[in-house]
Image: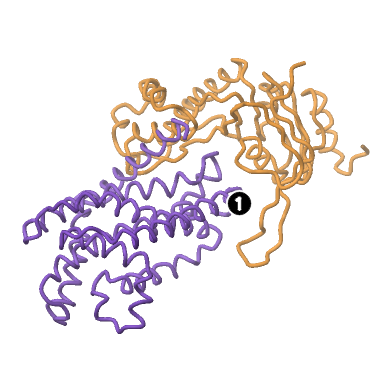
């Protein structure tokens, strides 16, 4: 990658985070407050009111939502990035991949902040650090690869069919519930459970929870499988963006 | 004569008419041929909707021709765009850097030129404020001050010769004319004939997406005026 592009990506990411901070009164506090409020809502409904879950539900939910929110923001923010920058794409000769990439990088930096906070909470409520933490970078890399792949794919198509945005939010909500983000998949009846377990998001969440809550090393073969799927999705995503790139400058803003 | 930097042969560019399934195409450029050589200052003239701006975007490498040939040497072409990538919540300084990166400058070069940009834009202390607090004139001043820093091999200009109030218009116009006189290769699209004749030595006349005539300034102007007076043209 030419150094000039790298500078553009890094500075745009800085600009994105900086602008986000200045857009609201509380600025950076929302990075943490927003997910915290969402977690509180789920905890209230599933734990306090429905009492669906036993002990250990709070950390289960915290880890699930933190990782899921990261994936979701990469897919939606990255996915809409080309579409929202069409005005710029019409005026300047820039590789369009830059735009989703910047969003995903910004979301990943935000995630790392929130994750650091999550670790402190986990240690506070009795889930101390352990040796299997060493596997976290691997699990997170695969998670990012998968989210980025889906994000690029969405980014490629949304400028051509902006109507898809209305569908994507709903699909992601369904995927969230089917991936064991808010409740454990053990409670799903058998034939359906095996089908859902094929979902890469479920495997990635399992691996992260295993590490953080049970000091368990990931299920490497399952992770490898997800990694291969992610790499394929990623390659297709990049390929489709590059294929469609000449059409974006011609689209009406 | 040196080899052309950019050469277009029967280039056409089509757009979808609207965002509907199965909507037709319209050709904004039908058939344009031209060549641009080192140091030339080429003016593009033609009526509204003739395809002048589309042609500039083809030259800039933003649009890829749907038919015809484009041959381009190893040259950078940059459309002079004001306020490219400006973000309301960022300071004038950050926006200048961001915009500079988008027009192809390296970060250290822009940072080195920040004092000059601040000076030229006459923003004073506002330079450190978010541009959301600027008046539109201030945004344009900052935009111009950044855009003029671009140093492509071929500078493409689309009707943005002067911005802001009368005084700044004078200053920005002068800065741009200075850039053009420094021997850069320039393609200029403008409705202002006096400006075109003052700044360009060659002209390309396009009409309905087709190149009608390319050549020395006075010759093409004469033919163009002839056509305007006698639209049915005894050509």
- Secondary element at image label 1: helix
Q: Colour of chain B?
A: orange
Residue A191 vs residue B210, the one in the foreground: A191
Where does residue A121 sit, x and y in percent of width and height? 11, 57
Q: Colour of chain A?
A: purple
Depth check, front residue: B29 or A9: A9
Residue at 45%, 44% in the rendered image: A98
Q: Numbered disc 1: what chain?
A: A
Give the left or right position of residue B149, taking residue B43 as reference.
left
User: Which residue matches tag 1?
Assistant: A247
Q: Position of residue B8 (x, y in %)?
A: 75, 35
The quadrant holding residue A123 is bottom left
Q: Is residue B203 above or below residue A122?
A: above
Q: Which is more toward the observer, B171 or A7?
A: A7
Q: Measured from the top left, where is residue A178 in percent x and y?
A: 33, 74
Q: Say which of B8 and B166 sits in front.
A: B8
Residue found at the very far right of the displayed protein: B234
């Amino acid at each position: 990658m030419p150094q000039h592009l790298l500078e553009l990506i890094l500075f745009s990411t800085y600009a994105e985070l900086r602008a986000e901070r200045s857009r609201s009164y509380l600025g950076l506090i929302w990075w943490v407050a927003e997910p915290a409020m969402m977690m509180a809502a789920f905890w209230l409904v599933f734990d306090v009111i429905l009492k669906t879950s036993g002990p250990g539900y709070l950390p289960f939910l915290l880890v699930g939502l933190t990782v899921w929110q990261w994936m979701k923001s990469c897919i939606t923010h990255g996915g809409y990035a080309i579409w929202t920058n069409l005005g710029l794409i019409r005026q300047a000769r820039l590789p369009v991949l830059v735009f989703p990439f910047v969003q995903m990088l910004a979301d990943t930096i935000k995630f790392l902040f929130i994750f650091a906070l999550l670790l402190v909470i986990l240690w506070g409520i009795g889930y101390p650090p352990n040796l299997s933490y060493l596997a976290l970078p691997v699990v997170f890399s695969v998670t990012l690869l998968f989210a980025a792949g889906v994000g690029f794919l969405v980014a490629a198509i949304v400028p051509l069919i902006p109507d898809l945005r209305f569908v994507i939010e709903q699909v992601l909500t369904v995927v969230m519930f089917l991936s064991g983000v808010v409740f454990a998949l053990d409670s799903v009846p058998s034939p359906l459970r095996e089908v859902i377990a094929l979902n890469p998001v479920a495997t990635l969440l399992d691996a992260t929870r295993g590490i953080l809550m049970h000091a368990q090393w990931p299920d490497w073969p399952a992770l490898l499988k997800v990694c291969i799927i992610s790499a394929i999705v990623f390659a297709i995503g990049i390929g489709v963006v590059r294929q469609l790139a000449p059409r974006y400058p011609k689209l009406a803003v | 004569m040196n080899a052309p930097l950019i050469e277009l042969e029967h280039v056409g560019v089509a757009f979808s008419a609207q965002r509907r399934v199965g909507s037709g195409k319209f050709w904004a450029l039908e058939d344009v041929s031209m060549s641009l050589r080192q140091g030339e200052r080429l003016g593009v003239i033609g009526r509204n909707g003739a395809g002048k701006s589309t042609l500039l975007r083809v030259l800039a490498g933003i649009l890829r021709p749907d038919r015809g040939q484009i041959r381009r040497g190893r040259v950078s072409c940059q459309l002079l765009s004001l306020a490219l990538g400006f973000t309301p919540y960022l300071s004038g300084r950050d926006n200048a850097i961001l915009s500079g990166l988008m027009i192809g400058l390296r970060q250290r070069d822009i940072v080195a030129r920040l004092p000059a940009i601040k000076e030229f834009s006459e923003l004073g202390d506002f330079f450190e404020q978010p541009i959301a607090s600027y008046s539109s004139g201030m945004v344009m001043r900052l935009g111009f001050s950044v855009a003029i820093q671009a140093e492509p091999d071929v500078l493409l200009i689309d009707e943005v010769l002067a911005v802001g109030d009368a005084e700044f218009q004078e200053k920005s116009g002068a800065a741009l004319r200075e850039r053009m006189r420094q021997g850069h290769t320039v393609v200029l699209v403008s409705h202002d004939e006096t400006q075109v004749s003052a700044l360009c030595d060659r002209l390309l006349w396009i009409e309905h997406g087709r190149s009608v005539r390319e050549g020395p300034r006075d010759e093409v102007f004469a033919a163009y005026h002839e056509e305007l007076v006698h639209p049915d043209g005894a050509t």
